[in-house]
Image: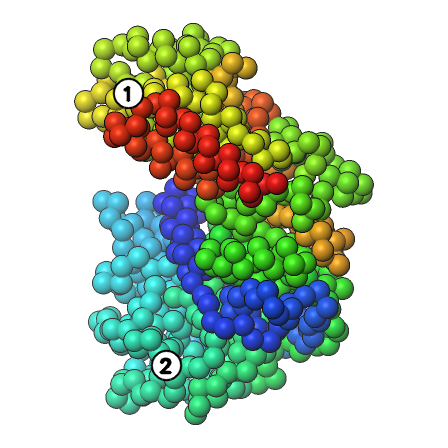
Amino acid sequence: MKIKIRNIICMLLAFVMLLSLAACGGGEKEKENLPPQEQLPQAEEKELSADNTVEINYGAEAVKKPEGVKTILNTAFFNNSMYLLGLDGNGNTLFFSTPLDEIQWTEHKIAIEAVSPDSYMEINGMMVDESSVYISGMSWDENGNELNVLRVYDRESGEQTEEFNLEDMGYMFRPQWLKTVNGLICVSDGMAVLIKEDGTVETLTDESTYFAAQVQDKVILCIAQGEEKNLVELDGETGELKKLCAVNGRFKPYMDCGSYISEGPVIMADSDSVQEINPETGETADMLYWNDIGVAASSGIQSMYVTADKEIYLPVSDVFSDKTEIYKICHQDGGTRKTLVVSSGAGVGGVYTNDAIAKFNRENGEYVVRQLVYNQEDADKILTQIIAGEGPDVFYIGSTTDRESAFTRVNPGKNLFVDLMPYLESDPDIKKEDFLPGVLESMTEDGHIYAMHPAIQAISIAAPKEFADALENWDMEKLKELSENLPEGYTLFNRNREGMMEYLCTLASVHFVNKSEGTCSFDDPDFAAWLEIIKNAEPYDWDNSAGYALLPCYAGNNIPRMSREAFGDYEYVGFPSSEGGINYLLSSVGGYSIMADSENKEAAWEYIKILLSYEIQDSLRAFGYPVMAKNFEESMKTEQDPEYGIDGKQEDAEKLKAIIADSAGMCEMNAVSDIIMEEAEKYFADQKPLDETVQMIQSRAGIYLAEHMQ
């Protein structure tokens, strides 16, 4: 089956949706076994300290895939059996079934491979009933127009018997299907429709629909009605929806939370946990947390089957790859484990966070990771808690571009964080040589590593070849000379003033601020020269400018973009200084620090190691470049693979590796950045001269650093 770049874009859009949803949350702090998103830090309480323990009452084991299946496309459940649609290594479609009481896969015919290569179907959903297999997806007609289709195949022969055009459905992301006496229910992207036998589509509700569930002989939907989440039952005779109850408690479904079939009680699942619901009162009771038992379900629950004995069968797909695991989850005594608390700011994590936690909990029999999530306005509270020795075991708030993270406001010299260098140097599984050259050096402060950054982006200035040759080992004088001698119609930068100030702030955190000593050097003439050049630089006009000389850039995860934006061949020249061009790194994920007061430092290091493991580094590619050399090289190969529609070259990869190896440090955006922005704006508006502006920045930044970094 062909792979289109459109798939990747859709996955990224899906991820952005998930990430924004992950930022939502709140509620008052309750007992320690509440899910992470419900807990807010409170300095006077220690309910999430390392003294807490968690009872693990469920376990998960992977169900063996059918022989020959490389990629699982979809699964469906019917009459206590599981059906699987997959691909072999050559892209051929395979169809299997197995009873759930004993996994013995049987292959069946399915005629999907007969679809013309010019009109193939991207499969996104499946359902099975007594006689048919229903497969939905996006197809393309002979003119290249997109079509949402539902194709029906005979279970016995595997031949296609019907096809429905779902033109009113919009883009269908992981649709959920259920068979009812009135027709087929489809839930996709919050939309619930009924597809009748004649192919007509009827909207079931105008409210956002989270999932459809077939519980014994009832069809139940969970829908949003104002601020409420309600369970409603679909009347089999009239097709009307009847409210059963409001869903109380902390159930937080995503739009693709999942359809399921249940032979027993009413069971609901969101990306955090599984709860049993009382349909009369709406009260929920916890069954399990996915992460506790080593299942990473953060990308949403697409389908689930619950037996009368409360055994759960769950396919889990990685949004960014074709990896799918099928888990069998059942009640078992997993014993009591200590809690390892990992804190983070709301919304700063991603799919990789749940993957890392699940992997740790799956492999560690002594500890279970629980997240403590707080909002940015709680930074002072968590900081007070840390200073009082009541903080988490592992501290993480987000990337180094977060303006007011607690980590950027605390000097490692206060002995709040553990030096990770001895752990790294003595670890039997991971070596310094395993890292991409340059990244460890950028994390190191005076020989110490106080925060581990699992993914990075490189920051530099690139120049088209026609300019780059004259800028080797360049300084501010060369930058001034270049700005005064531009070809006609050219601008100095391809950024406007605001964009260039963002780059200056990140440069300042590496070049004009000494965090370890709590000092700054904005009175350096180079800083004043930067402000003057940025003020006088004409913004690039994409419609009228002939070109630009310099391309300040975040080299994040698309090396082919560089040659396109530089209009051809280019070189990284770095930010000019008396020492030559400066390159530095941005931490797109991290840093992760171990608290000095943690009683679980060894376990905390094991968690940080999980973030550096091959599996998690692979899932970090959407956030920048992985820091481990092996994963980085694989990222480079992907960006040069025409199968994915990406046209990178090996020379692009070598140029990127060179500036990472030559990076001068890890940049930060904090209150100093805000000081620079505020004072520079007065200079740009001719309210203050340059010398007074620089003096004020030096004074204000110096006071801030002396107060917060000493």
- For the C terminus, give its image quadrant: top right
16 over 150 or under it: above or below: above
| Quarter location, residue 423 | top right
55 over 147 or under it: above or below: below
75 over 122 or under it: above or below: below
Q: Is residue 187 left or right of residue 449?
A: left
Q: Is residue 702 left or right of residue 440?
A: left
Secondary structure beneath label 2: strand
Q: Amino acid at mark 2?
A: Asn
Secondary structure beneath label 1: helix
Q: Is residue 627 left or right of residue 470?
A: right
330 and 275: which is toward the camera: 275
650 and 384: which is toward the camera: 384
Q: Please provide percent x and percent y for residue 254.
A: 42, 66
Residue behind mark 1? 536
429 and 684: which is toward the camera: 684
Q: Which mark is residue 230?
A: 2
Q: Is residue 303 left or right of residue 343?
A: left
Q: Amino acid at mark 1?
A: Asn
Q: Please provide percent x and percent y for residue 610.
A: 66, 50
Q: Residue at x 51, y 55 (%)?
A: 379
Q: CA distance from mark 2 to mark 1?
A: 59 Å
Q: Which mark is residue 86?
A: none
| Quarter location, residue 504 | top left
Q: Residue at x 34, y 23 (%)?
A: 690
State which tag comes first along the sequence, 2 or 1: 2
